[in-house]
Amino acid sequence: MKRKVERISTELAVRLQSWDGVDSILLADSAETGELDPYFILSLDVYYGGKLPASEDRQRQFSDAGAFESSSTSSKDRFLIEDLPVRIEYKDMGRVDEILKRTEENMWVFRQTGTYMFYRLKKGQVLYQASTWIESVREQLGELPDTFWELMIRSSRATMEHYLGDLISSVLMEDKLFYLISSAGFLKSFLSLLFVINRTFEPSGRNLYEKVWQLPEIPENFKGRFESFLRDASAFPPSRKMEIAELMTRSIVRMC
């Protein structure tokens, strides 16, 4: 990690750890790409118990920040520090504990983002911890029951097959907009399924392409088909990509 990024992330952690209820502060791997990388962002996950300070109070804590913005739909702040983009997400420890305690009853949590929440918990660099909570969580993440992965496979497969159906329909109807939407949904759900088949937590969309090649098991002829699906060329019109998607689906279903 570059010195500037390390210094600023440490300084932010010092401010945040002074708040009541803050237990753990993790730095996401998006800070490892380098400041000039378009994907760079200094992203912190703050795990807390109790009541979170109001957005106005949080803004006062970062009076030296520029372009401060709080999300109106989630506990999240964005701002600039020394021209570096910063995102801080505040996450309730009790909610994490509840999800881990009853994963089978909380499968809806993974419907949109897969296991990305667990990826951040497992892979984030610990900048601060007031207790052994994060260590306990990581231990639990390493011992998820077979039923969790089996349910994830079933759910991810159903989502993938749903998007495949949409993709086929959009091609037959020559609906360009719906084709783009269903193609993106198909690729995302296909990769989510591939990660859970490998019992591996899913990274962010920015890192999916890099991380997928590190999986120990991939479908037959996956690389060629995947690269062909991504290509924007006259040799691969929607009708051809529909055929590729069907082949990809059949190959991954054999792994389930």
Image: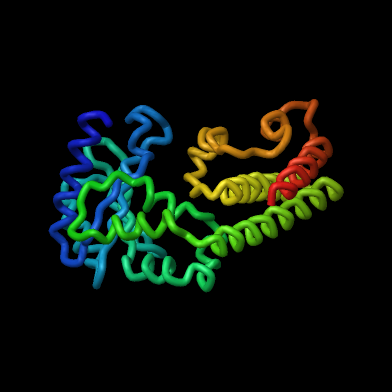
Q: Position of residue 111 (x, y in %)?
A: 57, 61
Q: Position of residue 110 (x, y in %)?
A: 53, 61
- Which color scheme does this rendered protein use? rainbow
Q: Is residue 27 above or below residue 148?
A: above
Residue situated in front as seen by the camera: 65 or 99: 99
Residue situated in front as seen by the camera: 79 or 163: 163
Direction from residue 22 to residue 169 in the image, left or right: right
Q: Can residue 168 be seen in the rendering of this structure? A: yes
Q: How many marks?
A: 0
Residue at 52%, 33% (x, y): give it. 210
Quadrant in the picture for residue 56: bottom left
Direction from residue 167 to residue 116 in the image, left or right: left
Residue at 29%, 49% (x, y): give it. 26
Direction from residue 39 to residue 242 in the image, left or right: right
Q: Is residue 74 above or below residue 211?
A: below
Quadrant in the picture for residue 230: top right
Residue at 63%, 61% (x, y): give it. 155
Residue situated in front as seen by the camera: 145 or 233: 145
Which quarter of the rendered picture does the N terminus lie within? Answer: top left
Q: Position of residue 181 (x, y in %)?
A: 67, 49
Q: Position of residue 234 (x, y in %)?
A: 78, 27
Residue situated in front as seen by the camera: 146 or 76: 146
Q: Can residue 177 be seen in the rendering of this structure? A: no
Residue at 26%, 36% (x, y): give it. 83
Q: Is residue 213 above or below residue 174?
A: above
